[in-house]
Amino acid sequence: MTVTTLANYINGAWRPSQSEQLLDVHNPATAEVLARVPLSPAEEVDQAAQAAATAFETWRRVPPVERVQYLFRLKTLLEEHIDDLSRSITNENGKTFAEARGEMRRAIENVEVACGIPTLMQSEFSEDIASGIDEFVIRQPVGVAAIIAPFNFPGMIPFWFLPYAVATGNTVIIKPSERCPMTMHLAVELMQQAGFPPGVVNLVNGGADTVNALLDHPLISAVSFVGSTPVARHIYARASANGKRVQAQGGAKNPIVVLPDADLETTIRIAADSAFGNAGQRCLAASLAITVGDARGPFTEAIVAAARQRVVGYGLDPDVTMGPVISPQSKERIERLIEQGVQEGARLLEDGRDIVVRGYERGNFLRPTILDNVPPGGIIARTEIFGPVLGLLHAETVDEAIALVNSGEYGNMACLFTSSGAAARKFRYEAMAGNIGINIGVAAPMAFFPFSGWKASFFGTLHGQGRHAVEFFTQTKVVIERWPKEWSRQF
Ligand code: NAD
């Protein structure tokens, strides 16, 4: 069977890359090569930037009410093709079909919110700041925006930015993850069908060099990034040194705190979904559970039982509840971290290594893994593992638990499980994370809220989604006007 090489989409047409550097895209459950992705050179980034800059001059003049008509059409097309897109996510990323469908729902939700741009772009107006003088704010698009995405939500994450960027009058270049580039290829085909004028949406495949060409390109004004913290730091530093506005969402190490008065059944269901959903490859995955006081025994016993119930396998098989991790390298890295955790004193309650899934012997499978007695300063407590591994810690008081939550480098998410309103309020007030869950795992904020990471989980000021995205993709122009009546002809 021939394997296709993915093309770039520039100025309204699919163009093969001239790059000789090609990477295989694997199905992580079967190891099958699904496609080849080119690592596009700087000249192809330049072609996309030129096309986007030219299209911007016309697109920014299209009234917002007309621009959103393309998004309404896109929303309909995404709905019609949601199963194809979800299958593509499962095949290239490994997550289950249900998880992939959930991902696409969140993508579509962002398109829906951006359809409100005519209202969302409205601004302030003050009449008579002095006699006969008015002052007001206009929101105008910033120009060409680059969107650089990670592998773990290949269908959703570009949509945290793209609908808002184009609805506010910008043009975009998407750079999908080179490990999962196929779903965005399908989504851009739908954008082509939706009729966006040439150059408004562009897609360039590639890796680090392609990204650096985007960060350095003088025609690109804004960069939206989601990925690991070291790369987010690099993106933020390099793009802002080049005078661009940047929002860079990074990695995470998310704690959940369980108090003795929590409803155990709800807590366990949510904690297991949060830790092992998407095989733990979520920036909002729970990776540390901190039990307080008497919560320890019952929580530990029940979470181990819940972990054992996960059915690991190929995400398109209907009974499967957890897919593989993205690559053999990722699997080896996770296994190594588990071993290091054991060596530093953690107790392995559930060991997910050495699993073979019948029929999928070449897949990158792990089972859920649970480590108890995790040392707070050690490798399991500090490292973003990005796999189905949950570390357990214990605290005697809520204050001690919150101190543990706040001792980490990251600040993407923190959750509390309790039936005490006072404890919940204290946690919400004091936990140093940008997304908080109370008796709920944080899936991802709804599209009309910002995806609000803190500390090493975010570099920038304005986050993705909702009003933050509208502000990020627009610049304010403040106008002060005087129209004395004696200058006008009398009618
Ligand atoms: P990654 O940082 O390896 O890659 C992300 C993007 O950066 C890719 O498009 C890749 O091509 C590019 N890239 C990689 N190395 C680069 C370099 N040296 N220079 C320039 N560009 C480079 O991330 P990943 O492994 O694809 O995704 C997983 C990470 O993303 C995890 O750390 C996860 O927590 C994070 N993530 C964060 C959020 C969030 O909202 N904060 C959401 C999803 C994923």
Image (tube, rainbow, N blue to C red):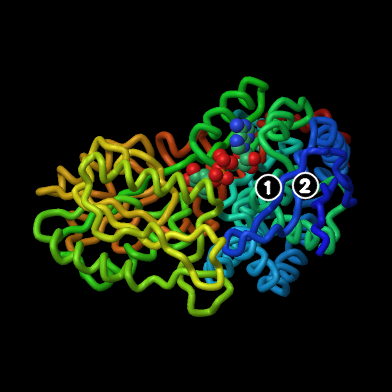
Q: Quadrant of the C terminus?
A: top right
Tell me the kind of residue under disc 2. Leu
Q: Secondary structure at mark 1?
A: loop
How many other residues sit within 10 Å of disc 1, few (<14), some (14-19) or many (≥20)? many
Classify residue 391 as left or right of residue 69: left
Question: Which of 250 and 344 lies nearest the eye of the viewer?
Answer: 344
Which of pointers 2 and 1 lies earlier in the amino acid sequence?
1
Residue occupying the point 38% across, 49% down: 413
Q: Which residue is mark 2?
A: 203
Where residue 184 sits: x, y (%)?
71, 55
Q: Image quarter for residue 483?
A: top right
Q: Which residue is drawn at the image coordinates 48% and 79% (left, top)?
A: 319
Single out the residue that lies furthest toward the top: 241
Mark 1 belongs to which amino acid? Pro
- Which SS class for mark 2? strand
Given contact means CB atoms under 8 Å apart, are the residues at marks 2 and 1 in contact? yes
Marks 2/1: CA–CA distance: 8 Å
Question: Residue 217: horizontal and vertical position, in percent?
Answer: 76, 27
Determine if the C-beta at disc 1 is less than 8 A from ligand 1.
yes
Where 387 sits versus 132, above or below?
Answer: below
Q: Does the Cβ of the disc 2 residue fall within 8 Å of ligand 1?
A: no
Q: Which residue is mark 1?
A: 176
Viewed as shown, does residue 150 lie left or right of 338?
right
